[in-house]
């Protein structure tokens, strides 16, 4: 009976195990079988004598992959259409350099922003300022160099004592300043000497002696001009002697003739001749008009012969300032031509200028508005002879001012 009970228990346990194995095979996951088998450690299966067999079965079940669950799905819906993927645009991470388009200068300037334009204007102003500063500095250095050349030329001619050799720069400057002061002081004293000589000449003529020659006449005129410049020039020497080179460059009319170095006088005369040449070249049409009016109306008033442009042209030709009111310009022209008429009379009396030196001959031609550059001294003499011949032919009945305006216009236009 016990044996049958044991056999029945074994059979019952085997049947139960089979049933549970079937459940395990049909379970959806492996974890459910494990939890079911090992849910309770105190279950009767684990205490069964054949539990070792169950453990082996359990290991096989765990190592075996359950068959997939197949579900038959019959769908009548049509398949969805396959949409082709759109290609993304290719992005160039490192594009090559593009050639700039050629833009006209006007368009590029018109398209500038105000800020950029202001910047460009400021840069141009800065550049012009820097260029102006460099030009002014070069001009100052030119003035200094010209003053040095004048001093060196005066030392070579024996007018100034040269500085001693092997001296420092400070002592050299002091020596030159001292020599210049001596020269200017001697020039002022020479004006007083000329005053006495001019007084003697006047006294001779007043007492019934010989009339004044051309040289004596011009000597007295030069002294009269120097006497008017004496006081302002003396103040310049006492206050600021070092500005005299600037006065020579920009205001030579302030200097007395006795206080001008030879190199300074040559530079003043050369500058005057350059201006005279420029007037003749730039205003030839004006001189032609003046010539035609003076030739057509020889007895007309000077105002009708010389308009505004004619006044400027003749002032430049005679070496006067072009600025001022028309009345002042006409007054200067009339005074100058009256002086030339008196000088012509003296030259006609003294062999038509045959005894003049080259310097005096050139000065006489420049006073009459005749160009002397690129001409020889013989040509200077022939030009003066031409002038005096035309003056002598007109006689004393002609208006001296109108007659010389006609000669000035002829010489400026090359009608010799």
Image: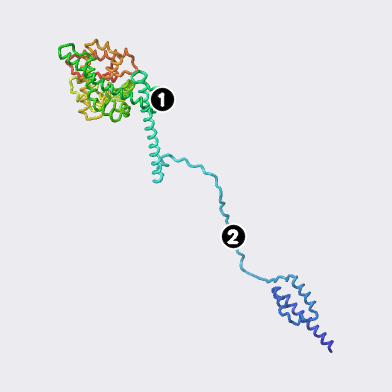
Mark 2 surroundings within 10 Å by alpha-carbon count, few (fewer than 14), some (14 through 19), many (20 or more): few
Give the farthest residue toward the left: 207
Report whether residue 263 is seen.
Answer: yes
Occupied quadrant, residue 410: top left
Left or right of residue 168: residue 346: left
| 49 over 65 or under it: above or below | below
Left or right of residue 185: residue 200: left
| 405 over 70 or under it: above or below | above
Residue 192 position, x and y percent, is: 23, 20
Q: Nearer the viewer, residue 194 or 290?
A: 194
| 75 over 209 or under it: above or below | below
Element class at badge 1 = loop
Query: Residue visible at 33% across and 27% down?
Result: 245
The residue pinned by badge 1 equals 167
Q: Nearer the viewer, residue 282 or 328?
A: 328
Q: Nearer the viewer, mark 2 or mark 1?
A: 1
Q: Quadrant of the N terminus?
A: bottom right
Residue 28 position, x and y percent, is: 69, 74
Earlier in the chain: of badge 2 and badge 1, it is 2
Q: Quadrant of the C terminus?
A: top left
| 192 over 4 or under it: above or below | above
Left or right of residue 211: residue 104: right
Residue 210 position, x and y percent, is: 18, 11
């Amino acid at each position: 009976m016990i044996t049958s009970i044991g056999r029945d228990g074994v059979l019952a346990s085997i049947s139960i195990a089979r049933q549970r194995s079937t459940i395990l095979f049909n379970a959806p996951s492996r974890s459910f079988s494990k939890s079911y088998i090992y849910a309770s450690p105190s279950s009767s299966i684990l205490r069964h004598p054949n539990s070792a067999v169950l453990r082996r079965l359990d290991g096989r079940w765990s190592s075996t992959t359950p068959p997939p669950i197949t579900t038959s799905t019959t769908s009548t819906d049509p398949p969805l259409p396959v949409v082709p993927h759109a290609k993304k645009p290719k992005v160039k991470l490192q594009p090559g350099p593009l050639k700039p388009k050629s833009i006209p200068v006007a368009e590029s300037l018109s398209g500038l922003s105000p800020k950029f334009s202001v910047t460009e204007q400021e840069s141009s102003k800065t550049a012009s300022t820097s260029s102006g500063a460099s030009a002014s500095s070069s001009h100052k250095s030119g003035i200094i160099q010209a003053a040095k050349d004048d001093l060196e030329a005066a030392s070579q001619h024996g007018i100034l004592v040269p500085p001693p050799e092997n001296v420092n720069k400070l002592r050299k400057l002091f020596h030159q300043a001292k020599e210049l002061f001596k020269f200017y002081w001697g020039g002022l004293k020479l004006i007083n000497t000329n005053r006495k000589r001019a007084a003697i000449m006047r006294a001779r003529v007043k007492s019934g002696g010989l009339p004044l020659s051309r040289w004596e006449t011009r000597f007295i005129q030069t002294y009269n001009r120097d006497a008017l410049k004496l006081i302002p020039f003396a103040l310049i020497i006492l206050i600021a002697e070092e500005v005299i080179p600037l006065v020579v460059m920009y205001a030579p009319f302030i200097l007395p003739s006795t206080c001008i170095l030879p190199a300074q006088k040559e530079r003043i005369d050369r500058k005057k001749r350059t201006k005279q040449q420029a007037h003749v070249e730039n205003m030839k049409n004006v001189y032609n008009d003046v010539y035609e009016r003076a030739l057509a109306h020889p007895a007309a008033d000077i105002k009708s012969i010389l308009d505004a442009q004619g006044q400027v042209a003749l002032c430049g030709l005679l070496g006067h300032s072009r600025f001022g009111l028309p009345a002042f310009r006409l007054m200067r022209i009339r005074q100058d031509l009256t002086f030339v008429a008196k000088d012509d009379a003296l030259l006609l009396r003294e062999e038509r200028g045959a005894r003049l030196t080259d310097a005096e001959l050139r000065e006489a031609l420049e006073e009459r508005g005749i160009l002397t550059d690129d001409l020889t001294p013989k040509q200077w003499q022939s030009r003066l002879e031409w002038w005096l011949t035309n003056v002598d032919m007109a006689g004393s009945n002609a208006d001296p001012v109108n007659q010389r305006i006609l000669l000035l216009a002829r010489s400026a236009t090359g009608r010799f």
